[in-house]
Amino acid sequence: MSYKKQEILAALETITVAGEGKNMVESGAIRNVVTFADEIIVDLTLSTPAMHIKKRAEADIIKTIKEKISEEAKVQVNIAVEAPPKQEEKQKANLIKGKPIPGIQNIIAVASGKGGVGKSTVTANLAVTLANMGFKVGVLDADIYGPSIPIMFDVAEARPLSVQVGEKSKMKPVENYGVKILSIGFFTKPDQAVIWRGPMASKALNQLIFDADWGELDFMLIDLPPGTGDIHLSIMQALPITGAVVVSTPQNVALADARKGVSMFQQESIQVPVLGIIENMAYFTPEELPDHKYYIFGKEGAKNLADDLNVPFLGEIPLVQSIREAGDVGRPAAMQTATATESAFEEVTKKVVEETVRRNEALPPTEAIKITTMAGCSAVNKR
């Protein structure tokens, strides 16, 4: 079941916040409405911290949506109290509104619906290929619970240094192979599990984004975790994403999740352009039989999905042992010159660049979505 944003807003126009003359939509108290399948998320900003007003507003929203939209809807109300922002908060607010980040030209989110499809491997190899092409590149490892980018760039033991930028002390990204890198993996021990709830993970990501001296970048690649959850929303709330790349393997179980990944970016309330789909582990070619291709996981599954969803197909990456070995030793396989692997990553990277240029010529800059953070909000699901 899916719900239309305009119908929800029309229903919310019948509610007035206590002490104000205008309805919630007209007064600007409703900051955003997001729908995911049978879930409706309403972002509400109030001018008073009074608990009874917050509870009343929350109850009115849930009741109205269930009466006018659907009794079956799962309703979540995120309530924030607006206070006069400090100067630093104003600067961050400008970023959250989708204004370009100084020095960073394109922000590309690399996502996958399913884990284990090689998303981080693809991210690392896209990054070094872009760097070899002459672009200035950075990678933000947003996989808070399973960071692997430090290992793939052979910088697992590195730690970001502190640099003075104006009056502020900022993190200097670790750099290797011409790529600037930041990851939560730099701040945890190899055997230490990151056991954080959503708000803590989002706060850590904000520090990696806003408290870092990224400098001038042509491309920032964001290695997202699998799925479509808190981290994805936090990233799209904090940054104006230029476009998204979805990685999948050819089998149906991975394609089903990749379809959800594409759908997330295409939600009415999100609308991040999908630059295309990359098919990883597309086929296996034995070293002793270089002219043979074995489609172990199925043939052209991601290509067919791209055609079905009307998004670009960015190319195939073969299932090659050297790609895995290169990632394990921290030297991305795309750096192996004059190989089929380097050629495959180069072709895919060229397509990503082409689609980015095409997107920038055809569409206005993406605005970061406006969803209030989970910290300090009230969330209620009722049936």
Image: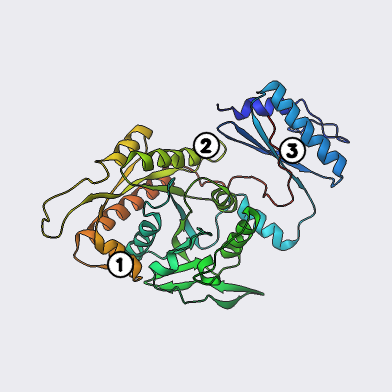
Q: Could you classify mark 2 by the number of other residues whose Cα lies within 10 Å: few (under 14), some (14-19), or many (20 or more)?
A: few
The alpha-carbon separation of the residues under discs 3 and 2 comes to 22 Å
> Residue 201 placed where, x, y %?
60, 58
Tell me the residue that label 1 is attached to. Answer: 326
From the image, tell me which residue sits under label 3. 28
Query: Foreground residue, 269 or 144?
Result: 144
Give whichever of discs 1 and 3 has the lower sequence position. Answer: 3
- Give the CA separation, mark 1 to mark 3: 52 Å
State left or right for residue 155 relative to residue 283. right
Residue bearing mark 2: 267
Q: Can you tell which quarter of the image residue 88 is in?
A: bottom right
Judged left or right of residue 289, residue 378 is right
Secondary-structure class at tag 1: helix
Residue 355, percent from left and from top: 36, 47
Residue drawn 41% across and 42% down? 258
For the residue labelled by badge 2, is the local secondary structure a helix, a strand or a loop? loop
Q: Amino acid at mark 3?
A: Gly
Marks 3 and 2 close (CB-CB < 8 Å)? no
In the picture, measured across the screen, residue 192 lies left or right of residue 68, that is left
Q: Nearer the viewer, mark 1 or mark 2?
A: 1
Model colouring: rainbow
What amino acid is at disc 1? Answer: Ala
Measuring from the top left, give residue 371's x and y in whole percent: 64, 45
Instruction: Give the amino acid at mark 2.
Output: Gln
